[in-house]
Amino acid sequence: MFDWISNIWIAIVMLFAMAWVINVASDKLGDVLHVLGLKLNIPNSVRGATFDAIASSFPEFSTAMVAVVVYKEFADVGVPTIAGSGIFNILLIPMLAIFAYHGTDKLKADPSGVYRDMVFYTISILTLIITAYFGKFTPVSGVILICIYVGYIVTLYLQTKKYQQSRTLGEQIADTADLKHELDEEGEDEDFVDMPYSKIFGVIIITMGLLWISCDAIVKSAIVISDTFGISKLIVSVVILAACTSIPDTLLSIKSAKLGDADGAVSNAVGSNIFDICICLGFPMLIAGKEIPVNFGENIIIFAFLLLSMLTTATLLLKKDGIGKKDAPIMAIVYGLFILYVIGVAVGFIPLNLLA
């Protein structure tokens, strides 16, 4: 579709243009998902971990699928993009949510939701690492990752049923009134909350279609940039593609934080990462129908940063008094170390393959 993106200037313009399209589509998607979660009486942490996470992760899914089906660059583009996006999501998104939070001066997330998401996220990362250690991704490894996500969804379903049984009609009416007030403050028509299901799903389909097309253009642009400057596709993917595809996750979490929804903001970030690893990587592994070579040595530090970023954010979120603006620099420092590593590899100061 985007074979006409053939030189560096077109590629750079398309990167910014498609990032803007993702921005607009994600903002509208965030609104309808909040309304859908309210209509279905789903707890904020579950909505953030499912509707918000899956929809905002569609760019990562699109990128991985395009990398496999169209450009045959899964190991060099798909995996690094998902990993880089995961590090971005788990560190920078909660940090930005802290600054956007309109509640008290500290953001407090439900500890049970944090433990739930972090446990499944850790299992997902370790499964990915073990698979990469053997030097190849296979349809079997894809099935294993997908099964982990199925287990995650079952856990969320059971929590939702328990939540719905404990909710009163008065609480549901109050939540609807609060959402109408917040949307009104953002300039949205409060009748937006009364949108019928048919229109909600129509908006979801249209916005996700725009995200798929945008990501196809971004992947092609990144490959052109990589070839033009002679930069490793892994480096381009882990920084540029990861940041671009994380725009929806970031915007949805910031929107949730502005609405005073700490659980939704945090669960979106972590739930997105679980979806990214288990589905955005697992499904392409499955449909590839063959073994996909992967260099463990080239990815080992990225995997290490995935674990480090998870431990950093989990530790801060589980603080008894909540996470405040003074904690934000810690997450920024860890992400800064990751960027320094990427720069070190790009300039040849750090070897890409540490096991060579």
Image (cartoon, grey):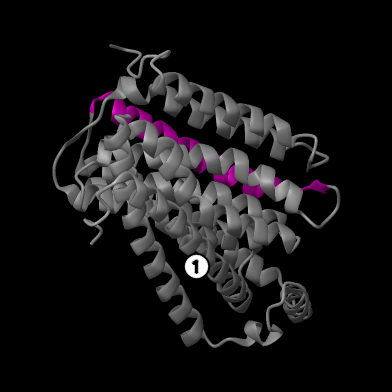
Q: Position of residue 288 (x, y in %)?
A: 18, 48
Q: Is residue 269 above or below residue 37?
A: above
Label 1: how many Cα within 10 Å (few below 14, some 14–19, many 20+) = many
Q: Main secondary structure of the magenta part?
A: helix
Segment tinted magenta in the rendering:
106-135
Q: Residue at x 29, y 43 (%)?
A: 224
Q: Is residue 356 left or right of residue 193?
A: left
Q: Position of residue 310 (x, y in %)?
A: 57, 34
Q: Is residue 148 above or below residue 41?
A: above
Residue 212 visible: yes
Q: Quarter of the image holding residue 185?
A: bottom right
Q: Position of residue 284 (x, y in %)?
A: 26, 49
Q: Position of residue 304 (x, y in %)?
A: 47, 24
Residue 119, magenta (yes or no): yes
Residue extending furthest toward the right:
104
User: How many numbered markers are drawn?
Assistant: 1
Q: Quadrant of the N terminus?
A: bottom left
Q: Is residue 23 left or right of residue 277?
A: right
Q: Residue at x 76, y 34 (%)?
A: 327
Residue extending furthest toward the left:
290
Q: Nearer the viewer, residue 347 or 107?
A: 347
Residue at the disc numbered 1: 25
Q: Residue at x 52, y 57 (%)?
A: 248
Q: Residue at x 45, y 37 (%)?
A: 239
Q: Is residue 40 above or below residue 216?
A: below
> Does dot 1 land on a helix, a strand or a loop?
helix
